[in-house]
């Protein structure tokens, strides 16, 4: 099923629900009557309905509100829809006010609530449908040809996007490539290229995805040709994948595919972000003072020191002092009160002062210590093009300071490509709901890093391809 068709179906369902929710809102306010008080009739709400339909088409296209962005992550979907519906309602109410038209604010309030609930239900139904198709096996069975971080990330992304209707069942790699097992360190078994199809056939593999830095490897080309001749689809991940800071567009030049790189991400700080940081800090700092004072009092009494500062690298690698409450991260045998403070992130609230000073932003890559930044690769150093933040895309996906910089960099650069006020507000809402959920979860006495996602592979091996032709060179 093509994702474009799914997106259009979701948009059609959204538009139908907009009409239904406004109808239900009218009925809740006026009942089963055409003529309401003060000359209000059903026709009064036709202009707001048409305006809402037009605005939602624009918002859905611009902000990609179908739910695919973020891999059907429930907090992300809720945050995006909440912000989008809020924008729609503000615009509708503002235009109604400016035109001096009497439109019941109660009807519009009912409309906004019903609209948000219905949009969430639409996406929940679509998600349930895809999960059901996965459970009954109505998916394409995929083998990834590759190893290392790229193969691992590809498998994770396919697992997080059920609308692709793909199930990763194993991995293959040429023998010359060192195996960095993405499926749990399973021992590799060598097999001839000509015998790979015989290995794949019992597992009913429908597609192989080439995720190699050298896709022109002789064994890989032989594998692709044999797979296609036996009805197994072949998909290619363009290389080099590290060209992550450019948007891509595939062009077909008389059968010659061209991958066009354009719209390189800007590294300048947008004005809207600084304005948002200052405004929200003015609101958040007074609200955060009570928990900070309580926690600081406890730490001062128990440890004789309430606050601490840590040297961190900010934008362009410039160092600054990041403030936090005096509780050592991820230490063993912490007192329960410190575990609780870290669990609800009260220890990080003093960083609002760093944001107000302009050293950090509310949303951005988490700052790391100079000792860690010193070992960055050139690709990882690109995350230093942005001002660091208290929260970010990597954090809402479960990555913390103890996770690898490689994994965090992929999320941070993805954020760099799509940074916008809408995304920042959405990430802040996701962070707030995550912290709210932690209040109802018991804290762990020891913080341990865990995988962001688990990939289940049905194959009990990883295959290592070797040439079946004695005269064929094994080098490029």
Image: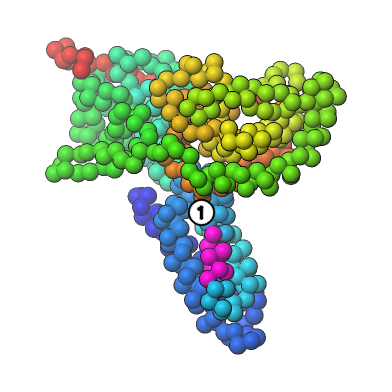
Q: How far from the left and from the top, in percent, is residue 239? A: 29, 29
Which residue is the site of mark 1? Answer: 123
Q: Is residue 440 left or right of residue 413?
A: right
Q: Name the magenta segment's main secondary structure.
A: helix
The image shows residue 467, relative to residue 133, as above or below, that is above
> Outermost residue toward the front?
357
Asked whether the viewer can see residue 439, the reply is yes
The magenta stretch is 87-95
- In terms of depth relative to the viewer, which is nearer, 201 or 428? 428
Q: Residue at x 48, y 50 (%)?
A: 67
Whether residue 118 sits left or right of residue 196 in the image: it is: right
Residue 177, x across and y down, in percent? 32, 16
Q: Position of residue 457 (x, y in %)?
A: 44, 28
Task: Inspect this view and state whether residue 132 appears.
Answer: no
Residue at horizontal 56 percent and vertical 64 percent from the top: 89
Q: Is residue 181 magenta?
A: no
Q: Position of residue 119 (x, y in %)?
A: 53, 59
Q: Is residue 89 magenta?
A: yes
């Amino acid at each position: 099923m093509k994702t474009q068709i799914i997106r259009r179906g979701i948009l059609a369902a959204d538009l139908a629900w907009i009409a239904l929710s406004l109808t239900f809102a009218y009925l809740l306010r006026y009942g089963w009557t055409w003529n309401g008080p003060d000359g209000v009739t059903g026709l009064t709400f036709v202009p707001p309905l048409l305006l809402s339909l037009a605005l939602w088409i624009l918002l859905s296209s611009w902000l990609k509100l179908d739910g695919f962005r973020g891999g059907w992550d429930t907090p992300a979907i809720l945050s995006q829809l909440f912000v989008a519906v809020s924008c729609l309602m503000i615009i509708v109410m503002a235009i109604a006010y400016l035109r001096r038209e009497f439109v019941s604010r109660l009807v519009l309030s009912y409309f906004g609530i019903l609209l948000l609930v219905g949009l969430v239900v639409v996406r929940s139904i679509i998600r349930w449908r895809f999960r059901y198709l996965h459970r009954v096996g109505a998916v394409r069975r995929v083998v990834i040809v590759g190893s290392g971080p790229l193969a691992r990330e590809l498998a994770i992304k396919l697992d997080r996007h059920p609308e692709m209707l793909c199930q990763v069942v194993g991995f293959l790699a040429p023998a010359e490539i060192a195996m960095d097992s993405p499926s749990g360190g399973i021992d590799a078994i060598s097999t001839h290229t000509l015998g790979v199809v015989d290995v794949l056939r019992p597992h009913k593999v429908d597609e192989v995805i080439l995720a190699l830095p050298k896709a022109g490897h002789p064994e890989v080309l032989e594998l692709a040709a044999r797979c296609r001749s036996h009805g197994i689809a072949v998909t290619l991940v363009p290389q080099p994948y590290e060209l992550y800071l450019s948007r891509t567009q595939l062009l077909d030049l008389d059968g010659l595919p061209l991958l066009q790189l354009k719209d390189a991400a800007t590294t300048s700080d947008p004005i809207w972000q600084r304005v948002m940081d200052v405004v929200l800090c003015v609101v958040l700092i007074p609200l955060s003072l009570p928990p900070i004072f309580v926690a600081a009092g406890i730490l001062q009494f128990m440890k004789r020191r309430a606050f601490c500062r840590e040297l961190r690298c900010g934008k362009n690698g410039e160092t600054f002092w990041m403030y936090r409450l005096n509780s050592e991260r991820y230490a063993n045998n912490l007192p329960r009160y410190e575990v609780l403070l870290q669990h609800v992130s009260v220890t990080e609230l003093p960083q609002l002062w760093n944001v107000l000073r302009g050293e950090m932003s509310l949303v951005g890559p988490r700052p790391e210590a100079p000792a860690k930044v010193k070992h960055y690769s050139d690709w990882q150093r690109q995350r230093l093009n942005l001002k660091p933040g208290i929260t970010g895309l990597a954090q809402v996906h479960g990555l913390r300071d103890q996770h690898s910089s490689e994994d965090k960099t992929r999320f941070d650069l993805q954020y760099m490509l799509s940074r916008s006020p809408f995304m920042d507000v959405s990430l802040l809402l996701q962070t707030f709901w995550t912290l709210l959920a932690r209040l109802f979860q018991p804290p762990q006495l020891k913080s341990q890093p865990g995988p962001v996602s688990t990939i289940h592979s049905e194959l009990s091996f990883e295959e290592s391809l070797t040439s079946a032709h004695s005269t064929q060179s094994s080098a490029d």
